[in-house]
Amino acid sequence: MEGAGNAPRLLEGTEFEVTNLTGVPGNDLDYYTYELGRLQDTAREVLKAFDDPLEIVTALAAYEAAIPNLRAARNPITHPSDDARLDDVGWFSALVRFLPDGKVEYLVDPRYAHNVAALTLADGLLAFLREGLNAP
């Protein structure tokens, strides 16, 4: 991730040391999570407006299966929720939930499968809308 080499460390020198990328330009996880929610909302609106086209139903189902906890730790309208339900959530290079056994559950990870799912849904929406508009 951008800036990771120069970013400060949290719990430095312990077995739990992590890189703090909060506020690093190019790694705005909050905004990325917000946009993933907007993409999901856009697909839902396309479903309503066009009477549930099968390709979008399928694409949205795959997206929601790939990122099932997208809205688990964030108020989708403004900012991360500021309540007790976030006591076990951390914002690093990915949004994670800390599990009792010491492992983490990835809620939103801008790398790998979550990003692929987002790009796939966006491409599907664009293809569907372009076809309907007869646009290139």
Image (cartoon, rainbow, N blue to C red):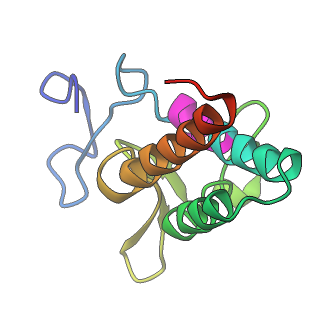
Residue 126 percent across, percent down from the top left:
56, 36
Please determine whether, in this image, residue 23 is positioned above or below residue 78: above
Q: State the residue at coordinates (55%, 56%).
A: 89
User: Is residue 36 highlighted in magenta?
Assistant: yes
Please determine whether, in this image, residue 131 is positioned above or below residue 28: below
Main secondary structure of the magenta stretch:
helix
Tell whether 127 sits left or right of 81: left
Q: Residue furthest top?
A: 25
Q: State the residue at coordinates (68%, 64%).
A: 57
Tell whether 108 sits left or right of 134: left
Question: Quadrant location of the N terminus?
Answer: top left
Q: Is residue 68 visible?
A: yes
Tell whether 69 sits left or right of 14: right
User: Is residue 26 highlighted in magenta?
Assistant: no
User: How many labels were placed on the picture?
Assistant: 0
Residue 33 percent across, percent down from the top left:
56, 40
Q: State the residue at coordinates (82%, 48%).
A: 50
Is 86 in front, or is 40? 40
Q: Residue furthest bottom?
A: 101
Q: State the residue at coordinates (77%, 45%).
A: 46
Please determine whether, in this image, residue 23 is positioned above or below residue 127: above
Residue 15 percent across, percent down from the top left:
18, 61
| Region of the chain picked out in magenta, as a range | 30-37
Please determine whether, in this image, residue 128 is positioned above or below residue 53: above
Is 72 in front, or is 122? 122
Residue 104 percent across, percent down from the top left:
40, 69
Q: Is residue 82 visible?
A: no
> Image quadrant of residue 9?
top left
